[in-house]
């Protein structure tokens, strides 16, 4: 239970859902976790995990705010003297068919899911390069590979994360840094909880393991790619979807 002992991990979108699950599992495995999120529930989540013995702090941080993200990374480095792991998990959906999609719905999803990943990676990477070690794992999605009705904006960002990761992996490998992505399938979080039960049931029927995924399922996939032992896995997209493809 100590695969991340002595390591410092920044997790974006750590307030709830998959991000909160990653915070919990990384803390269980000995990491010092810094959770960045825009919502105040991030503090509550961090307090709950800390009460169970986790070494975790919360910093209200909007990954679309370049200047603040830069400050947040500098603070993390100053406080802990290292940043070993960056999990680019924060993401949003603004679903609508392309014909009806507003410019705001397009821009906001690109800004959080893609530009936010750029912003966080841009400011953390120099510390990893200096240390000669790093693990960067970013959230793609099954819908970035297969597409989904009403998600041209979201699918564009999640496909982009794959290209970003594969290109970054080629640049940073020589510094002891790996860049990988996880493409979650159908996972029960607030992002999916608002769906009607019949749609959820129809989704589960398509999943060979016959259940919806959990944040904990995803957290263990992230744990593998964030671990030292995964050092020869670079530029990979881990499809964690219960066997859909
Ligand atoms: N739930 C699924 O089925 C599923 C499937 C595939 C991929 N994903 C991806 O996994 C990631 C997590 O999804 P989830 O279901 O846990 O979502 P969620 O909505 O439950 O949590 C996302 C978190 O990101 C935070 N966030 C949003 N904008 C932010 C910003 N600008 N700066 C910092 N934090 C911000 C939110 O406040 C929230 O806490 C996302 O990138 C999502 O696209 C989820």
Image: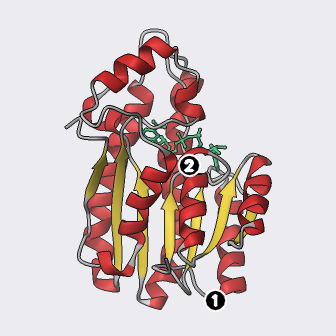
Check contact, mark 1 vs mark 2: CB within 8 A. Answer: no
User: Judging from the image, what secondary structure is the residue with disc 2 in?
Assistant: loop
- For the rendered model, the colour scheme is secondary structure
Residue most extreme to the left: 245
Q: Compared with residue 223, is residue 94 higher up or lower down, i.e. above or below?
A: above
Q: Earlier in the sequence, mark 1 or mark 2?
A: 1
Q: Name the residue beneath numbered marker 1.
A: 81
Q: Residue 214, image x and y in percent?
A: 47, 44
Q: Compared with residue 154, is residue 230 higher up or lower down, i.e. above or below?
A: below
Q: Nearer the viewer, residue 80 or 212?
A: 212
User: Judging from the image, what secondary structure is the residue with disc 1 in?
Assistant: loop
Q: Residue at left 55%, top 22%?
A: 103
Q: Residue 101, image x and y in percent?
A: 50, 16
CA gap between label 1 and label 2 equals 24 Å
Q: Residue at left 28%, top 31%?
A: 207
**Quadrant of the image occupied by residue 145:** top left
Disc 2 within 8 angstroms of ligand 1 (CB): yes
On residue 144, the disc is none
The quadrant of the rendered image in which ligand 1 is seen is: top right
Image side of residue 199 versus residue 41, left or right: left
Q: Residue 198, image x and y in percent?
A: 44, 12
Residue 148 seen in this snapshot? no
Image side of residue 206 versus residue 155, left or right: left
**Quadrant of the image occupied by residue 43:** bottom right
Q: Residue 53, image x and y in percent?
A: 71, 73
Q: Nearer the viewer, residue 53 or 185?
A: 53
Q: Name the residue beneath numbered marker 2.
A: 90
């Amino acid at each position: 239970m100590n695969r991340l002992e002595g390591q410092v991990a920044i997790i974006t979108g750590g307030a709830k859902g998959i991000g909160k699950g990653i915070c919990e599992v990384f803390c269980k495995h000995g990491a010092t976790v810094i959770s960045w999120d825009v919502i105040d529930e991030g503090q509550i989540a961090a307090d709950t995990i800390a009460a169970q013995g986790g070494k975790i702090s919360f910093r209200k941080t909007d990954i679309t705010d370049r200047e603040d993200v830069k400050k947040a990374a500098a603070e993390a480095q100053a406080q802990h003297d290292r940043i070993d792991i960056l999990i680019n998990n924060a993401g949003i959906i603004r679903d609508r068919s392309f014909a009806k999609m507003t410019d705001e719905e397009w821009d906001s999803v690109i800004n959080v899911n893609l530009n936010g990943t750029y912003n966080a990676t841009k400011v953390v990477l120099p510390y990893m390069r200096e240390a000669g070690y790093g693990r960067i794992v970013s959230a793609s999605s099954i819908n970035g590979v297969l597409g989904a009705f009403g998600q041209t904006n979201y699918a564009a960002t999640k496909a982009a994360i794959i290209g970003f990761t594969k290109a970054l992996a080629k640049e940073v490998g020589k510094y002891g840094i790996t860049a990988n992505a996880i493409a979650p399938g159908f996972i029960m979080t607030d992002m999916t909880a608002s769906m009607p039960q019949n749609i959820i049931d129809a989704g589960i029927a398509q999943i060979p393991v016959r259940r919806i995924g959990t944040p904990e399922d995803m957290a263990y996939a992230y744990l593998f790619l964030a671990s030292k032992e995964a050092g020869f896995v670079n530029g990979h997209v881990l499809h964690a979807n219960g066997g859909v493809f």
